[in-house]
Image (cartoon, rainbow, N blue to C red):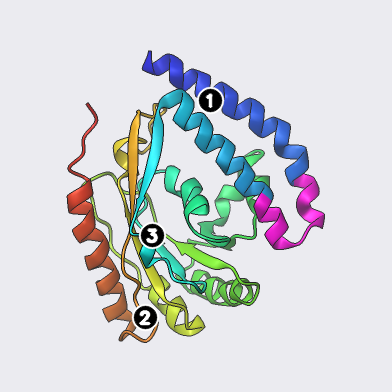
Amino acid sequence: MLLIKNLLFWLCFCVFTIAIFPIILLSIFLPAHQRLNIGIFWVKVVSSLLKNIIGLDYQVVGEENIPNEPAIICCKHQSAYETLILHLIFPHQANILKRELFYLPILGQGLMLMNPIAINRKSRTKATKQILEQGKKRKDKGFWITIFPEGTRMKPGEKGKYKTGAARLAQNLQMNMVPVAVNSGTYWPKNSFLKYPGTVKFVILPQIAWDFGSVEEMTKQCEQQIETEQEKIEQIVIA
């Protein structure tokens, strides 16, 4: 039954994505925030498909920690799920992502129109420069910025090296950091075709001021907040 539900989800996902793709392409003529609204509509429909077909939903804890002004969202990365749902939790945001994603058919072209910050991960120097330059432009337009501090998806229980890019960006742009813990990997495993029913928990943690301390201190604080919360929410397992 789980396999059938997943096949049905992917069928509906593909049909809807192909149907809306011409509208997304035409949005190139719209201002950045209006283009993103179309992308968010796509996210809402995909989220509804996941909820109603798979039984995969989400819960937000700590909404009171969302600041009133644009900030840098530093989220644990375990699956593609958070790349979608963060757009339903926080105001308009620009995702920092690897430019190779633009090569994906249809989805890649859609991503290009959503005002992301695309980086060359093969060159750390170039990536840092791209983040700072493009980040300034996004901030000036009123966008929040989303970054996954470990740089890649991690399986539940795993922890990667937290990179200093988010803290450097925070200090350079004078934007606070908002750490977010998430246990999406429990229900949407890395490199797995199957998605499992359940409720993904997004925990929004207290923000870290851009002048909290050194880049290393801010990165360490972000890591401690996220990983401490991960230990709590990753006790949930698939039945």
Q: How far apart are marks 2 and 1 (CA)?
A: 41 Å
The answer to which of marks 1 and 3 sits earlier in the sequence is 1
Look at mark 1 in the image and give the residue it sits on: 10
Depicted 217 relative to depicted 163: above or below:
below
CA gap, disc 1 and disc 3: 31 Å
Residue 80 visible to the viewer: no
Which quadrant of the view contains residue 191? top left
**Of marks 2 and 1, which one's residue comes earlier in the chain?**
1
Residue that numbered label 2 is attached to: 209
Residue at 45% across, 31% down: 51
Instruction: Left or right? Give the position of 111 relative to 192.
Output: right
> With respect to residue 103, does 72 lie above or below?
below
Q: Sort mark 2 into few (<14), some (14-19) or many (20+) by Cα contacts within 10 Å.
A: some
> Disc 1 residue type?
Trp
Between 69 and 23, the one lying in front of the other is 69
Work out whether residue 99 or residue 31 is closer to the camera in this orientation and state it: 31
Expressed as whole percent of the image width and height from the top left, the position of residue 45 reads 58, 36
Magenta stretch: dominant secondary structure: helix
Earlier sequence position, callout 3 versus callout 2:
3
Q: Which residue is drawn at 25% across and 44% down?
A: 156
Query: Badge 3 is on which residue?
Result: 63
Q: Where is the C terminus found, in terms of image quarters?
A: top left
Q: Which of marks 1 and 3 is in front?
A: 3
Label 1: state its secondary structure: helix
Region rendered in magenta: 25-37
Secondary element type, mark 2: loop
Amino acid carrying label 2: it is Ala
Residue 30 in the image, given as x and y percentages of width and height: 79, 57
